[in-house]
Amino acid sequence: MTAIQPAIAMDAPQRTHPRTFAVKAATMLTQLVIPIGVASVTILDDGDLGDLAVYFLPFVLLVIAANFAVAYLQWTRLTYAVRENDIRVESGLLSRAARSIPYERIQDVSLEQKLLPRLFGLVEAKFETGAGGGDDLKLAYLAEEEGDRLRELIRARRDGRSIAAELAEAPTEEASETLFAMPPRRVFTFGLFEFSLAAVAVLGGLAQQLEFLLPFELWDLDGWQERLAGPGQWLSGLGPLAKAAGIAIAIATLAWVGVTTGVVRTALREWDFRLERTEKGLRRRRGLLTRTDLVMPVHRVQALKLTTGFLRRRFGWYGLSVVSLASDKASSNHEAAPFAQIGEIVPIAAATGFALPPEGLDWKRRSPRASIDSALIEGSILLGVSALVFVFSPYAWNGLLPLVPGAIVALRQYYLYRFDRHALSGRFLYARHGWLAPRMMIGSRVKLQSVELAQGPLARRRGYADLRFGLAGGSFEIEGMELEDAQAWRQAVLESLSSTDFSEISGAAPDMEQSGA
């Protein structure tokens, strides 16, 4: 841990670091680059350079000065105070807003460094409440030492330790053990599996938005044919072979763009990925331009999620993420090992107090009646659509088109029945889903928040049910269980919950149950 000076005082309102003003002003300037550039090109196209020098440049300088003034006023009007029971943040120029978050609601404090703040030695502190929906509090920007110190103070108060003692405590180096790391070669390999055509979509969007700057109509197909008529004559004379070669080149170009985009995006996000076990929990640091520093308290982890893909599974690559009290349902921020082998995932799972499924576990399938009923319901809807098309369409064969999705529905339900599995051990619940991109949820019987057995009218008559387990940061549901199994599972989990004091659960690793995925 970085050496921290005891600079944070209780109750006294403080401003963020003075360099925050410079960062926000620079950020505002970057947002003005495109509008100013477009306006400059438009004026130059009119050929009136005098108007650009006399009217436009002074206007630009005025806008820049106004942005600096607004950034300075925003910095002066934002204060925060570390108080006895909560942290309070006040902000606003004309309309003042004050927000207080009690320490017991704060699950953790993560630190993030985007490129520009990182150049100034600043971090953004994010107070995770686990509420989701944008309810978390952010404080931008603090010095790196102050951000570390504030995080330790929040944890101390949340855990019931004295803030005064924490302030007086001498800086110490936090002991850590590296559980998982991704060197550049691993990051590059990960990027090869992250195929993405996002760059093509972005370039297409920019071309459409800035089409007025081009000397021709970008989407005018007739115009393109006229331009290529002369240079393309020799190509058209080569016949079908040349056209096939052109298609192959186009596909190869798209593949190259997709692979390059995936590698770049992965490198920006996962560069120097490092997961360490510390006294506070699992500490994850990653990122090239935006550097994040997140600590996941072990005793707050409620479940693990193990994912893979069709190709990744063939090469033995998996991703591991944790579901904790600080997680947001829509967030993937709690990835513990995004690209790892099973042998690397086993010690990480053990460090969180969980275990992969052992050999000989009694895996159960979903009820065949649930799969049949779902296929019939979904298929009947598609058959209704097919009948309408058959009646109103002049072409009778069109009525067969909805049968294609019907076959897909039937095939999907067959694979759900064949590949979905669930199992219950002495300490954990396991649920496997999917075939092309399989995933597994591992839940702790003593860390779940609720158990719900749900049955619709048809399920009550047919004797199956859905079992839903409450998690603060995600969802854990097993569909189509045999009713007897669902009732037995619910009773077993409720007994585990009632016999355990959640406040006394520690992050100690359990006896090793795992032997493979």
Image (cartoon, grey):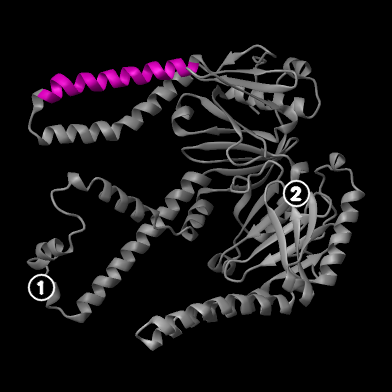
- Give the left or right position of residue 373, taking residue 94 as reference: right
Residue visible at 69% across and 59% down in the picture: 343
Residue 368 belongs to the span the image colors magenta: no
Q: Is residue 277 visible?
A: yes
Check the image and report above or below for 511 versus 284. Answer: below
Check the image and report above or below for 448 versus 477. Answer: above
User: In the image, which disc is placed on residue 356?
Assistant: none
User: In the image, which disc is placed on residue 302?
Assistant: 2
Q: Residue furthest top?
A: 12
- Which residue, given by chain and number where applicable, does mark 1 sit on? 234
Q: Label 1: how many residues lie within 10 Å, few (<14), some (14-19) or many (20+)?
A: few
Q: Residue furthest right?
A: 499
Between 219 and 257, which is closer to the camera in this rendering? 219
Between 343 and 497, which is closer to the camera in this rendering? 497
Q: Please provide percent x and percent y for residue 36.
A: 25, 31
Which amino acid, mark 1?
Trp
State the extent of the magenta-drawn residues as a range.
Answer: 51-75
Q: Which secondary structure lies at badge 2?
A: strand
Q: Real-space Cα distance between discs 2 and 1?
A: 66 Å
Q: Residue furthest front?
A: 392
Between 71 and 125, which is closer to the camera in this rendering? 71
Residue visible at 46% across and 38% down in the picture: 289
Q: Label 2: how many residues lie within 10 Å, few (<14), some (14-19) or many (20+)?
A: many
The majority secondary structure of the magenta stretch comes to helix
